[in-house]
Image (cartoon, rainbow, N blue to C red):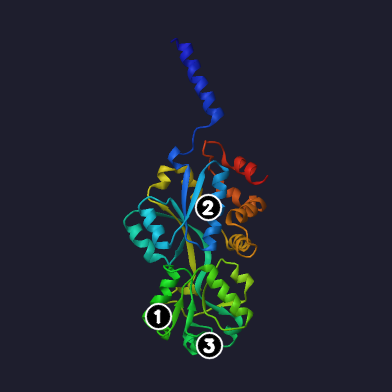
Amino acid sequence: MTRFSVRALYAGFALATLATGAAADPAACRTVRFSDVGWTDISATTALASSLLESIGYGPKTQILSVPVTYASMGSKNIDAFLGNWMPTMEADRKPYLEQGKVEVLGPNLTGAKYTLAVPDYLYEQGLQSFADITKFRRPLKGKIYGIEPGNDGNRTILGIIKDNKYGLGNFDIVESSEQGMLAQVERAIQRKEPVLFLGWEPHPMNTKFKIKYLSGGDDTFGPNFGGAEIFTNLRAGYAAECPNLGRFFKNLTFDLTTENVVMGKILLDGMPPEKAAAAWLKDNPEIWSRWLDGVETFDGKPALPAARASLLR
């Protein structure tokens, strides 16, 4: 082969590479495995991330798993990403996997969240304003605190309070069901102006749908500032190094309370599936999600932003 033909061969290869783009991540990175612990805020953020990734050539898949199973699955490399690491309430769940080097933490992806016990405003006005007041209302509350799914970190906090008779709540019971089940009970109680004590949090459309108040005095259990929380992105160990393009994407991914409340409202109040709620928000807010794609490429190595806009803004 002459020097000219070798030179021509390399030139042709270079032109082909420019024309088709080189893969941004290895083929094994194409499928992105998310855990969703069944809370609407995590369903919302996971759907937003998944829709964007799908628009740039990845194949996201989501499994509904409890918090403990989520961390065990990341530890065994069966889950790649989890967007719902509420801190500090998930400290006990995350800590062993972090110490063993099985989980990497990015973020926070959301600040300004809260997570503690709440009551309707009319019950608050009657005097149930702090954890210390709860025992005075045991009879009208029928000794019940409404939580969400079994195994949830908030439920475990409540169970610990009951077990240790913290705040004098040793004779209370927790009602475990699901987020939707708890909210249905709260809605029924509010419609009837009945007393109800439940696990509340923000972001969540419950804060706009219902007139609720968060109880003070739970700093020792739920944390200060009404269970003030930051939410972190967790990746299985080594994932960002194996899939650097995805690593950039997840590092860029940050949300705000307004975004999450809007998307969650579409899911809970308008009855949209999470993927359709995410698509509607993405179509209306390209100026926000465009920055999530800074420095990110499509799976086949082209600039991500034009591809995402072509797919999501149709």
Amino acid bearing label 3: Pro
Sequence-wise first label, 1 or 3: 3
* Pointer 2 residue: 253
| The quadrant where residue 85 appears | bottom left
Mark-to-mark CA distance, 1 and 3: 18 Å
Q: Is mark 1 on a helix, strand or loop?
A: helix
Q: Is mark 3 on a helix, strand or loop?
A: helix
Residue under the point 57% across and 78% down: 213
| The C terminus - image quarter | top right
Mark 2 surroundings within 10 Å by alpha-carbon count, few (fewer than 14), some (14 through 19), many (20 or more): many
* Pointer 1 residue: 162
Residue 152: x and y, percent? 44, 67
* Pointer 3 residue: 140
The nearer-to-camera label among 3 and 2 is: 3
Residue under the point 57% across and 72% down: 184
Amino acid bearing label 2: Leu
Query: Measured along the vertical axis of the image, is residue 19 above or below residue 54?
Result: above
